[in-house]
Image (cartoon, rainbow, N blue to C red):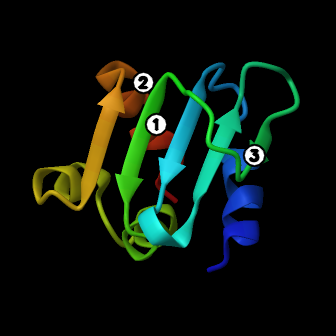
Amino acid sequence: MALDDLKEKLKSRLAGFNHTVKFDFEEDGMLFVDATTNDVTVTEEDKDAEVTLRSSLETFEKIVAGDQDPNIAFMMGKLKVSGSMGLALKLNSMLED
């Protein structure tokens, strides 16, 4: 799955989130989501966010596809969280398929 495909999925899934989040895929790039307005924007900019999730692109694609439980990925060290843990938990259900 390319970053462009993820952008579209995140736009639809994070509608109503009302926060900012950054997804850092290390050498594969990053996505910044601003869901504070009615029109969710997703860019590849490196901006400060309320919560940052770091993982490989492969792990994140599995989470979005429903093939990887984000809680298990976090416990195994495949998913790292910086910032608000409460927002990360809220994202949990919004990201899973």
Q: Earlier in the sequence, mark 3 or mark 1?
A: 3
Which amino acid is tagged 1?
Leu
Q: Which mark is residue 87?
A: 2
Can residue 5 be seen in this snapshot? yes
Q: Is residue 63 above or below residue 39?
A: below
Q: Quadrant of the N terminus?
A: bottom right
| Residue at 37%, 51% in the rendered image | 54
Rendered location of residue 85, percent (x, y): 30, 24
Q: Amino acid at mark 3?
A: Val
31 shown above or below 52: below
Q: Nearer the viewer, residue 70 or 57?
A: 57
Measured Cα–Cα span from mark 3 to mark 1: 15 Å
Residue 42, label in figure? 3
For this orientation, the residue located farthest to the left is: 76
Q: Secondary structure at mark 3?
A: strand
Q: Residue 59 location, x and y as percent?
A: 37, 70
Please state the horizontal and vertical placement of residue 20, each as a whole percent of the image: 61, 27
**In this view, the mark in front (3 or 2):** 3
Q: Residues within 10 Å of mark 1 (few under 14, many from 20)?
A: some
